[in-house]
Image (tube, coloured by chain):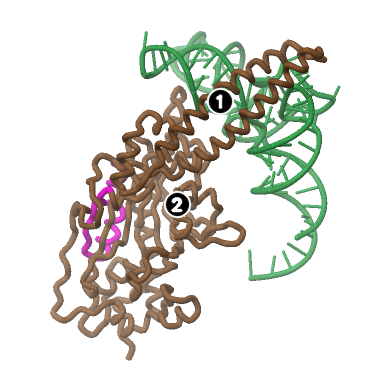
Chain colours: A brown, B green
Amino acid sequence: MLALQQIRERPDWVREGARRKGEGAPVDEILTLDAEARRIRSEVESARARQRAAGAEIRGAPTQEQHEELTALKRSIQEGDTRLNELDARLESLLLEVPNPPHESVPFGTTPDDNVVVRTWGEPRRFEFEPRSHLEIGEALGIFDFERAAKISGSRFAVLRGEGVRLQRALVACMLDIATREHGYTEIAPPYVVRRDAMVGTAQLPKFEDDAYHSDDDMFLIPTAEVPLTNLYRDEVLDTSQLPISLVGHTPCWRREAGAAGKDTRGYIRLHQFDKVEMVRFTTPERSLDELELLTRHAEAVLQRFGVMYRVMLMCSGDTGFAQWKKYDIEAWAPGMERFLEVSSCSVYADFQARRANIRFRAGADERLRFVHTLNGSGLAIPRTFVAVLETHQERDASVRVPDALRPYMGGVERLAPRA
RNA sequence: GGAGCGAUCGCCUAGUUGGUCGAGGGCGCCGCACUGGAAAUGCGGUAGACGGGGUCAACUCGUCUCGAGGGUUCGAAUCCCUCUCGCUCCGCCA
């Protein structure tokens, strides 16, 4: 969230930021409530100052006169406090709904067409035959079972079988090794179920509660490892010498996808549960934009290793999410589907999340506490990467060549062969 | 699930017959002294949030914060209630 002070001092910047994202921000209501809260707070504070001064003088049994005067003072302080509590609670919930204004380098736009291709890597593979979709390949290989998945869990769940599971495990293991061994990330195995305040900390809540799986006892299944990994340092003061902190974790992710009814209903593309390898970084305000470039390169390195063509997109303001400052999506080319699939989303949040989760740092002994900047990026979403690998490396007979980088994780298997 | 204990300033800890406690001590950290340099030692300093003033930086004034919220009281870290979290033991269980 933003600081009340930022809204007070730069209301137009906040309004404009929301407008660019195609969202609203209750700036006027916040300013009105804030003005009232400050007026009352000042009254209550001076009343309390009088109360303290009187108390210090008395330090024993008060006279009848003092007693009556102080009782009246107490009443007025209590009334002021009650009103202040109401105002503060209302302000707090309004503040949680103000979107993060996008960085100035984010292009204005309202539709995906306004996103900008920053760079591409590789060429779409040319086939000497009609490339199949991953569903057709999967059918031949016998690695998907969507019917039985639907039987036990409904639509948008997948069952993977046999060599398919092994390939998925190989993708995960390889990604984790790249992140930890080559890019210096520390691997974390976090809880998959989190409390409400963790979801608020990373800004999934309160705005997007409908998207999350939620239990009777107010716990949430994580929609991404970003939630537990970022909240790892909630309410802490980080040592500058530790920064940047870079974490990577592999977790399942659960999403209701409530707003996407009817979209991508077929295929291993949009699921209520999927695996993802996620990278999270904590850094200083001075370095965070550079860190976003670095983080994005780290995600790209994975696709390069798998020999999958991709493009990096700078999201326009309308596609830059509620909490994000700036975001790149990485889209992998799936030749069987003849479309790009979003396999990674790399974002920097400035101090928007850090302020919610109260994660701070001190640059030196004489420096004041400041909020860190947080970043996260998929490295990568597993099912869509799986699809891109299958479709890119398919052969005429529906077999799939295993990319070199994955073979050590597949017991040396070089290709997945269709069922006899 | 049952029983008990606990939550204080970065960390550890003192304080529970209510007032002089925003709060003592130790560690850590910073500065100074000592030293060729360091260690050790000595001295000093060392919370945050919010609001007001300010050359908006230094600084300064006020209020709040002893897990959170509420209550009693002229006055609460200290008393009462509720909640949250943690620990120990028992039960159950992968």
Q: Where does the magenta region start and end?
A: A290-317
Residue carrying label 1: A41
Taking the image as shown, residue A316 lies to the left or right of residue A33, namely: left
Foreground of the two, A58 or A391 = A58
Q: Which residue is drawn at 24% across and 70% down?
A: A334
Give the chain of mark 2.
A
The answer to whether residue A173 is seen in the rendering is: no
Foreground of the two, A288 or A103 = A103
Occupied quadrant, residue A364: top left
Horizontal and vertical percent position of residue A66: 76, 13
Do the numbered discs 2 and 1 sit on residues whose CB atoms are within 8 Å?
no
Q: Which of marks 2 and 1 is nearer the N terminus?
A: 1
Foreground of the two, B28 or B79 = B79
Look at the numbered disc 2 and give the secondary structure of its residue. loop
Horizontal and vertical percent position of residue A231: 49, 47
Q: Which residue is drawn at 33% across and 69% down?
A: A263
Structural crowding at the residue carrying mark 2, measured as other residues with C-alpha within 10 Å and reported as few (<14), some (14–19) or many (≥20) = few
Occupied quadrant, residue A57: top right
Residue carrying label 2: A207
| Amino acid identity at mark 2 | Lys
Picture layout, residue A284 above or below residue A56: below
Picture layout, residue A270 above or below residue A227: below
Foreground of the two, B89 or A67 = A67
Give the distance between the C-alpha atoms of the residues marked 2 and 1, in whole angstroms: 29 Å
- Within the magenta stretch, is there residue A316? yes
Q: In which quarter of the image is the N terminus of chain A?
A: top left
Q: Residue at x 46, y 43 (%)?
A: A96
Give the chain of mark 1.
A
| Amino acid identity at mark 1 | Arg
